[in-house]
Image: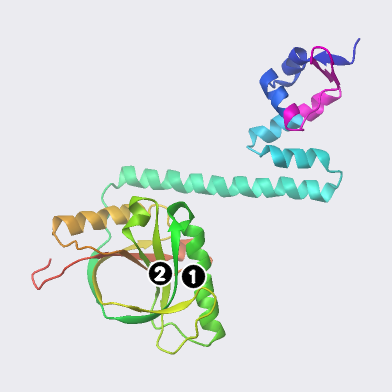
Amino acid sequence: MSELLSIGDFARATHLSVKALRHYHEQGLLEPAQIDQASGYRRYGLRQIGTAQIIHRFRDLGMPLEDIRDILHTSDLSARNELIARHLRRLERELAGTQAAVASLRDLLEHPQVATPIEHRRLPARRVAAVTGDVATPDIGAWYNGALGELYAVADSQHVEPTAAAGGIYADEVFTVERGEATVYLPIAAQLRPAGRVHLRELPPVELAVIGHDGPDEGIDREYGALADYVSRHALAVEGPIHEFYPVNRHHTADRTQWRTEIGWPIFATATTP
């Protein structure tokens, strides 16, 4: 019996389509055992079935082709195990994100109304240490974490204690066109020397309607929606950027369930404001 299979028979044996086998050949994952020079027809060896099955399993797990190629081509067992472990960690993160999204959706369906109270807050002018940048909205999370870490590091290195919770200011463009100016800051009383991206800034007084959100950012859009509804119904909204405050963040604890974010919508308050 021949030890070579046609590409069609090999596809049947491995449950990989002919199109997939050709793609894996082009990507250097699975080279045919023999290629007819005249017709270009591919034939595969019986011993390659195991390799094809490994590729199939990894693709079912969503592993990138580059990682599969590295796994197949390395003879270093520890390097191979690290590549597999890295992908499994990525799957765990994605699973956690999916579970959080499902929990948020279930909560939205079962409790469509947000019961979180809304308060009015008048802030005076403040001196802050800040990091400001032009940021794409999909990158805002990574940018925020880096900026906040840099602020705390510079303040700690100069023995400057924040006088209030860290905060953020986000231009309308961050929400409307997915790119705009963002600022993360720490209020300070003592003098601080600018370092790296950290600079000093004076924030003007502002009046805000404020709502709180406990836990990580998943589901924070519900509080944003409730706050917008409140401000609109009471005709309080004025032009200005969105403010956020981070009284409990990753600097204080790694437990995401303990985090707290407060969202501030600029308003014009009066003595009769509800």
Residue pushed farthest top? 1
Residue 216 appears in the figure: no
Out of 205 and 255, give the one closest to the viewer: 205
The disc labelled 2 sits on which kind of residue?
Tyr
Q: For marks 2 and 1, give the CA distance.
A: 10 Å
Q: Position of residue 87 (x, y in %)?
A: 67, 46
Q: Which mark is residue 162?
A: none
Compared with residue 74, is residue 126 higher up or lower down, i.e. above or below? below
Q: Residue at x 21, y 54 (%)?
A: 229
Q: Residue at x 16, y 62 (%)?
A: 236
Out of 207 and 171, give the one closest to the viewer: 171
Out of 258 and 82, give the one closest to the viewer: 82
Residue pushed farthest left? 272
Residue bearing the label numbered 1: 148
Residue bearing the label numbered 2: 246
Residue pushed farthest front? 38
In magenta stretch: residue 43: yes
Say which element carries label 1. Answer: helix
Q: Magenta stretch?
A: 25-52
Q: Position of residue 17 (x, y in %)?
A: 68, 19
Would you say 230 lies left or right of 30 here? left
Residue 101 appears in the figure: yes
In magenta stretch: residue 29: yes
